[in-house]
Amino acid sequence: MTDRLADLSAAGVAVWLDDLSRVRLQSGSLDKMRREQHVVGVTTNPTIFAKALADADAYDDQLKDLAAQQVTVEEAVRLLTSYDVRWACDVMKPAYDASGGVDGRVSIEVDPRSAHLTDKTASEAKTLWWLVDRPNLYIKIPATQAGLPAITATLAAGISVNVTLIFSLERYRAVMDAFLAGLEQAKANGHDLTDIGSVASFFVSRVDTEIDKRLDKIGSDEAKALRGKAAVANAQLAYQAYAEVFSSDRWQALADAGAKPQRPLWASTGTKNPDYKDTIYVEELIAPGTVNTMPESVIKAFEDHGETRGDTVTGSYAAAQKVMDDVAAAGVDLTDVFRVLEDEGVEKFEASWAELLEDVKKSLSAAAKGSDSPSDAAK
């Protein structure tokens, strides 16, 4: 029997799961995926946690304890989510050890309401780091303009970072610069660079969703022929930028001091358009030293019928650039596309965070009144 996920891993793509819940941890599902499906990392976000807490009774005992202590709603959210992430870090520790600290990582995100506040983001990153207290943790920080200096400051403190919500090449280059600056400061601060990890989460499917919508509105045959091509092309060009930066003298000086490169992580890899192959954002983005974080549905789809055709990225730069040039020539304002996607990304996570706070507030209230099932109040 063909082990398609093993083939994908052998091609240089680290398979990560874009999901986490107390139920998944209690059932042993995550550990099984690590052992049997080559899953070597986990990403979370406010939307994932909002769903996890709303759908399960697994949090009831902890909610009762927190209600008895009369903690604030925000404190309860942090304790609930950090508990899950700490547990997941322990589950993924064998992958962390086996890879020399490259994989086996689990991400937790700063409060998305702080996305445009540099100092608050940096201070929360430190708080989450000591709260979870695991070496294989990643703190997720959005790649907003205010997030960039927070990324540098967090890395400078010796804290590993997953940079999220990257859509454009311009912003991605700024992220890599923030990473290099952070490691340079960490080195100056006396931190061991071999302990610091980072990935840069470059979003994929949302790019097609937004650009396809604009191509449809333009309506020409040329525009329609470009549907479903921009997201992969954009990501392929991001890998080109990655290859350039991490072959530079500036990077080499850090590598010589033990630093690990900041790997590109393909995020938002579930297809939003049912007309597109469900594994397209995996198959077309296979390259050495990358991460692909997938919902379980995409992992299962690739396991069933995914194709690993070797490196599908590094030979594609000219064709990818032509796609992006053609999209712009058709009348799509790419600068506006990436601005809209970043704004929407932050807004979606803020909405999920608000939902999470509201659900936990109801659950704490129910627990305080002695309800048998606090989670029922959140449904």
Image: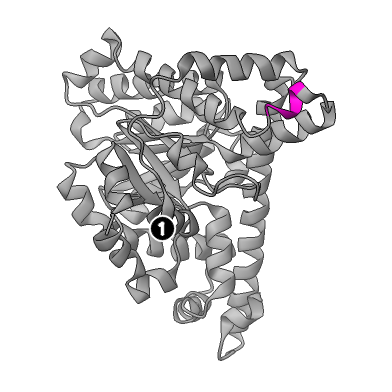
Residue ID at (61%, 62%): 356
Q: Is residue 276 left or right of residue 306?
A: right
Q: Is residue 209 visible?
A: yes
Q: Which residues are magenta?
A: 222-226
Between residue 85 and residue 23, name the one nearer to us.
23
Give the main secondary structure of the magenta stretch: helix
Query: Residue 350: x and y, percent?
Result: 65, 49
Query: Residue 281: x and y, percent?
Result: 50, 40
Query: Residue 321: x and y, percent?
Result: 55, 15
Q: Secondary structure at mark 1?
A: helix
Q: Is residue 91 visible?
A: no
**Residue located beneath label 1 in the image:** 304
Between residue 92 and residue 351, name the one nearer to us.
92
Residue 137 included in the magenta stretch of the image: no
Residue ID at (24%, 20%): 188
316 in relation to 285, above or below: above
Q: Is residue 152 left or right of residue 233?
A: left
Between residue 186 and residue 306, name the one nearer to us.
306
Colouring mode (rainbow / by chain / secondary structure / one colour): one colour
Query: Mark 1: few, some, or many residues within 10 Å (few <14, many ≥20)?
Result: few
Residue ID at (16%, 18%): 256
Residue 225 included in the magenta stretch of the image: yes
Image quarter of the C terminus: bottom right
Residue ID at (68%, 44%): 347
**Figure label count:** 1
132 in relation to 372, above or below: above
324 in relation to 194, above or below: above
Q: Amino acid at mark 1?
A: Asp
Image quarter of the N terminus: bottom left
Query: Residue 11: x and y, percent?
Result: 28, 37
